[in-house]
Image: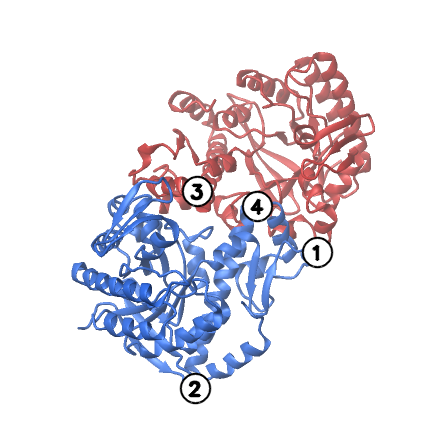
Chain colours: A red, B blue
Amino acid sequence: MRHKIYYELIKECKHTKARAGILHTPHGDIETPIFMPVGTNATVKAVLPEALKEMGAQIILSNTYHLHLRPGEDIIRQAGGLHKFMNWDRPILTDSGGFQVFSLAKINNITFEGVEFQSHIDGSRRFITPEKAIDIQNALGSDIIMAFDECVPYGKDFDYTENSLKTTVEWAKRCAAHHKNENQALFGIIQGGMFEKLRKISVEETCAIDLPGYSIGGLSVGEPKELMFDLVHYTAALMPKDKPRYLMGVGSFDALVEGIAGGIDMFDCVMQTRMGRNGTALTRSGRINLKNSRYKNDFTPLDDTCDCYVCKNYTKAYLRHLVIANEILAGMLISWHNIHATIRFVKDIRDAILEENFHVIKRNFENVWYNDK
Amino acid sequence: MRHKIYYELIKECKHTKARAGILHTPHGDIETPIFMPVGTNATVKAVLPEALKEMGAQIILSNTYHLHLRPGEDIIRQAGGLHKFMNWDRPILTDSGGFQVFSLAKINNITFEGVEFQSHIDGSRRFITPEKAIDIQNALGSDIIMAFDECVPYGKDFDYTENSLKTTVEWAKRCAAHHKNENQALFGIIQGGMFEKLRKISVEETCAIDLPGYSIGGLSVGEPKELMFDLVHYTAALMPKDKPRYLMGVGSFDALVEGIAGGIDMFDCVMQTRMGRNGTALTRSGRINLKNSRYKNDFTPLDDTCDCYVCKNYTKAYLRHLVIANEILAGMLISWHNIHATIRFVKDIRDAILEENFHVIKRNFENVWYNDK
């Protein structure tokens, strides 16, 4: 079936699995590979929507779990949907809440039916089922919605992971059966922990559902980066070529290069804004911790190769002053730079794929470039 | 003497002491009456300079005391001055630090020579003299600088206030003698506590120094609002007509109307940004505390008569969500609205003065308008 939201493959790298494409959605086209800034609570922390557009953000992510708990999907439905509520007219992807239920809430019970948990905000008892996760996302009106899944913690054994995986696949089927809105694309989530065998089963069974896109979940949960990279390459290679592939929760520069080389199209990460609020700037030549006193009278920009608003107008000395004085503007400006730098990094990679020199750029990155681990 | 920074009187109200004018400075003209947003630490909290311009901010205030302690005036001098450091190319007024030394620091000793105090940041011992306050402000390069003064706490008796006043006048003379930069206008500060007799002496002795502008300090320090209004009217009427008159630390809507009616040209206040960060919006028909659950599903703007970016793009329900979720964007957006609304309020008053109907507007305000006390 041809979905309303569909992926168009434009170019493949001859030396890696990297690819460039376009993801068509009702709120506009998304050029992939793409980095998606995270707006957990219907706001990308400390950044205005207009600024996100200036940075080149084509799609942002928001969190079903958080919005369900606060303000509740009914408020957002009444507001005319999440786009209108938060003043963002480009595409939005919402995570299903699976990851947050398992990482933020106190779990009371996981059954085949769903998950009973306590809100991390007020301790209230909640029950989410795959159908409920779809209902919430339908109310939010995001362009891409995710199937409800269990994100298996790092260190779980084969048997636990296999059982969890079976549940996640069944949940994905129930999500697909329950989801009716053709303006929203439901993506399935590949799980399987650190086990190639289970990743393979997960791909086979999840992709058999015929959804408009698939993500790799359950990585970047504490495992060594090399293991993550291996599993990304292994898993992505099994996934259908005609559908977008989304690596969830990953967005450091090295992981972006590796993920794209493995055939990933979409990424999201909170690192850009979290580090922004903590006074750490991301650049292609390394991270800058502005608390370091060496920046006290450094009147150069964060990155003199960066064309973002922050690098054009502010010095490290000023940003350091804001960080030390605990000023909100510090988080606003450094988050801005970090998101811009990441979007631009991925955009440059996309251009390189189109120009058939991604493999060269990849080698250069690996040589000159600060190790993000 | 004709100063480089000078006031041009354009229009006087026939029914009140209100007046419209232009304050000419090297960084541009300022249309008075004017509200000046406060950027204590070289940043108007949670607001970008470009946003301030969109709001119509013509001049901002910054604090000598804070910048002296952190990052230190040498850093700012090396950066090329405060304008360049903070990316603001319009006029800046710096407070002398007198008010902050007396309100934030632990005072060890006040002598005729100066004030010995402990930094509220790290407890380090500091000594500020009038000459030092000028040196710091010269290093900062602000367009309007303030004489070093003692801001007398509310409740001090006549004798204390009279003695303090004598010191403040002598300090103003020393500031004037020490200040050499003709691109920076030194304003004197009228003190005298709650005593008309002392206010009169302060005006006479301070204005005898022939400075390019004068402010009224030592009000809005805890006294009843009626007393403040009476003292503003009394004091402003004694001040020279050909110089700008600045009422320090005052910016609520009712006080703006009263101050302008008394002949004040310039105002500053931290209320707009402080309330913005606390989830309270200012409108001409009252304050809106967004924590109130009645706004949960109120999908109207903060003020449907307001043309600011926030009122054009966001609802009370969304802003309330941000406040409840403790999101930085809440402070960013509500501060934006509050500053815009205040600047616009004063601009409308200026237009009314020019159109000779300020007295009508003033009466209407007093009737319909929420009491800001």
Indicate the amino acid at tag 1. Answer: Asn
In 3D space, how far apart are the residues under numbered discs 1 and 4 (Cα atoms)?
18 Å
Q: Is residue B142 left or right of residue A8?
A: left
Label 3, on which residue?
Answer: A326
Task: From this view, report whether residue B241 is shown above or below residue A249.
Answer: below
Contact (CB < 8 A) between labels 2 and 4?
Answer: no
Badge 2 element: loop
Label of residue B327 in the image: 4
Q: How many marks?
A: 4
The chain to which mark 2 is attached is: B
Q: Earlier in the sequence, mark 2 or mark 4?
A: 2
Badge 1 element: loop
User: Residue at position x 78%, y 33% from top?
Assistant: A130
Label 2, on which residue?
Answer: B15
User: Residue at position x 31%, y 66% from top?
Assistant: B159
Callouts 2 and 3 in the same chain: no
| Residue farthest toward the bottom in the current orientation of the protein | B14
Instruction: Name the quadrant containing residue A232.
Output: top right
Q: In the rendered image, is residue B183 in sight?
A: no
- For this rendering, which residue is in front, B249 or B347? B249
Label 1, on which residue?
Answer: B297
Badge 4 element: loop
Indicate the amino acid at tag 4. Answer: Glu
